[in-house]
Image (cartoon, rainbow, N blue to C red):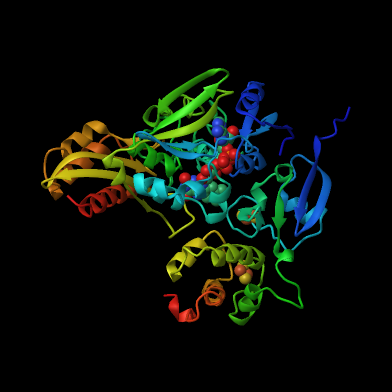
Amino acid sequence: MRSFEFLQAHSVEEALALLALPSTKALAGGTTLVDLMKLGVEAPARLVDIQALPLTEIAVTGETLRIGALASNSAVAADPSVRRLCPALCDALLSGASGQIRNAATMGGNLLQRTRCPFFRSHDWPCNKREPGSGCPAHEGADAHHAVLGTSDACLAVHPSDLAVALLALDAEIGIRAGHAARQVSLAAFYRLPGETPHLETIIGAGELITHIDVPITPLAATSRYLKLRGRASYEFASASVATALHCENGRVVELAVALGGLGTVPWRDRQAETLLIGGPLSEAVINRFCDALLAPARASAANAYKLALARGAIRRMLESASC
Amino acid sequence: MHNTPPSMTVTATVNGQPVAITVDVRRTLLDLLREDLGLTGTKKGCDHGQCGACTVFVDGRRVLSCLKLAVTTSGQAVTTVEGLGTPDVLHPLQEAFMRYDAFQCGYCTSGQLMSALAVVADESLTTRDQIREAMSGNLCRCGAYQGIVEAIIEVKARSHAAGSEDATPDAIV
Ligand SMILES: Cc1cc2nc3c(=O)[nH]c(=O)nc-3n(C[C@H](O)[C@H](O)[C@H](O)COP(=O)(O)OP(=O)(O)OC[C@H]3O[C@@H](n4cnc5c(N)ncnc54)[C@H](O)[C@@H]3O)c2cc1C
Ligand code: FES
Ligand code: FES
C-alpha cells in the first residue's frame, strides 16, 4: 500500500476543506477503499476519516425519508420505518456482503463502491477504468460476470451495488456538498455510462461529499421488493437482481417501477419500457413484451448471455407474485 | 533521503486492557492485533474482506479487522477471541464448538466464534436458515458448517432459556 497522510474531520465543514486538497479521498467504513488501497488500485495521497461526522441519522420529514450518508448498511436495514416505507431498500442491503461488512459499510460508500471486475482489481492486466487508454481484456473474452447493458468499446464492468438498484426503483435523490454549495441529484442521473471515459463513474467531483439520500415516501415505495440471483446463496454479488414496485387498481397496473442490477455498467431502468405495462392486467404476454423492450439494447456474449434469461425470470417471478 | 512513513498513536482498549501504540498509518487493525500485540488468535485468511477469519468486535459490533485501518480504532473497544474465554473457563460457544465438532483445522474458528457471538445476541434470528444466513460471512474450507450451526443453536437456546423455562434446541427449526 502506498503511504498517505491520515486526517480526521470533526465537522462537515472541516471535511469539505480537507477534501479540497489534491489527491484526497474520504474514508468511511473502508470496506471498499482499504481493500483497493491494498491492491494498489487506489493510492490517494491523503485520507480524510469522515466517520465522526454527524451524518448517521435516519429521519422521516413530511413526504421524505432522509438517510444520512454515514448510516451503516446494517442500521438502515434494521430500521423499522425504512422497512415499512420502502422494504426493497432493506432487502437490497441485507442481500449484500455479510453481517460484518454491513456493520462497517456506509450508505455513501456503498453508492461509490467500485466494480469487482477482475481486470480492474489486478495490475497484471490493462484496464481502461483503472488506467485510461490502457485497453480492456474483457473485449477479447467477456466472462460470466461482465455487463450486457450500457457497455462500450472501452468497458464492460458491472456496477456491483445492490443498494443503488433499489434506490433507482424508489426515485431516490442523493444530497451532495462541495465547499459551500449543496446540490441534490436523482439517482437516475448519478451514475455515468462508461462510454469513452469509464474511469468517470459518477457525477461526484473531487472534493465533494455525499451528505444524505432522500427517498420519496409514496404508496408505490411501500410495495417495493428486491430479488437477487447469484452463484451462491449468500455473501456474493448479483448475477442478476431486480427491484420492483407495483400499484394496481381493479387488476390493472396504475404505477410501477422495475430496476435491474448485475447486468449493467450502471444500475438499469427504462421508464419508456415501463409504460408498456401501465393500464393493463399483468399477463405473461405483456411481461414478455416489457422484457423484450427493457433488454433490447443488451449486447451479450456466449459467456454472459445467461444474465438475460436470469433477468427475465426474476422480473416475471416478481411481477407475477405481486398482488395485482 | 528517507521519509519516515507517517505514523500515529492509537489509544484503544483491547479485551478490556488499555493500549497505546504508535503504528504506521497503513497498519490494519488485524496486523496491529497479530504483529504488535501478539494476539494471534485472530486469523488472516484473505486480507480482503472475503473470508471472515479476521472477525472481531469493535464497540459491540462484529467487523472485519483486515479492512479497518488501525488508526481509526482510537477511542474504541476491541474484543478478540482471546477476550472470549480462557483454556480453563471456556465461553459456552467455545465449549459447544468442541462438542459439536464445529471445526477441523481450526483456522476459521476464531472468526466463526466472534460471528457466532453476534448471532447468539441477536434475538431476531430464530430459525436455522436465518442463523445460516447470518453466519454466511465466515467461510470454512473444512466444511464444518453443520456443526457450527448446531453449536450456535444450542447456545442460543440455553441463553434464551435463562429467560424462558421451556426453550430447547428443538424450538429452533
Ligand atoms: C467481500 C465483499 C462483498 C461485498 N458484497 C456486496 C454485495 O453483495 N452487494 C453490495 O452492494 N455491496 C457489496 N460489497 C460492497 C460493500 O457494500 C461496500 O464496500 C461498502 O458499502 C462501502 O462502504 P464504506 O463505508 O465501507 O466505503 P469506503 O470504503 O469507506 O469508501 C468507498 C468510496 O466511497 C467514498 N466515500 C465514502 N463515503 C463518502 C461520502 N459520504 N462522500 C463522498 N465520498 C464517500 C470513498 O472516498 C471511497 O472512494 C461487498 C464488499 C466486500 C468487501
Ligand atoms: S482476512 Fe479479513 S475477511 Fe479474510
Ligand atoms: S475448520 Fe478448517 S477452515 Fe474452518
Residue placed most toward the observer, B144 or B69: B69
Residue B116 seen in this snapshot? yes
Residue A142 seen in this snapshot? no
The image quadrant where one finds the N terminus of chain A is top right
Q: Position of residue B37 (x, y in %)?
A: 81, 56
Q: Is residue A109 shown left or right of residue B79? A: left
Q: Is residue B74 shown left or right of residue B131? A: right
Residue placed most toward the observer, B53 or A42: B53
Q: Is residue A281 shown left or right of residue A317? A: left
Q: Quadrant of residue B118?
A: bottom right
Residue A257 to residue B154: above or below = above
Q: Is residue A115 shown left or right of residue B90? A: left
Ligand 1 appears in which quadrant?
top right
Q: Position of residue A133 (x, y in %)?
A: 53, 25
Q: Position of residue B115 (x, y in %)?
A: 59, 62
**Residue at coordinates 55% horizontally, 45% vertically from top-left?**
A105
Q: Position of residue B91 (x, y in %)?
A: 68, 73
**Residue at coordinates 64% horizontally, 47% vertically from top-left?**
B67
Residue A153 to residue A79: above or below = above
Total count of labels:
0
The residue lying furthest to the top in this view is: A180
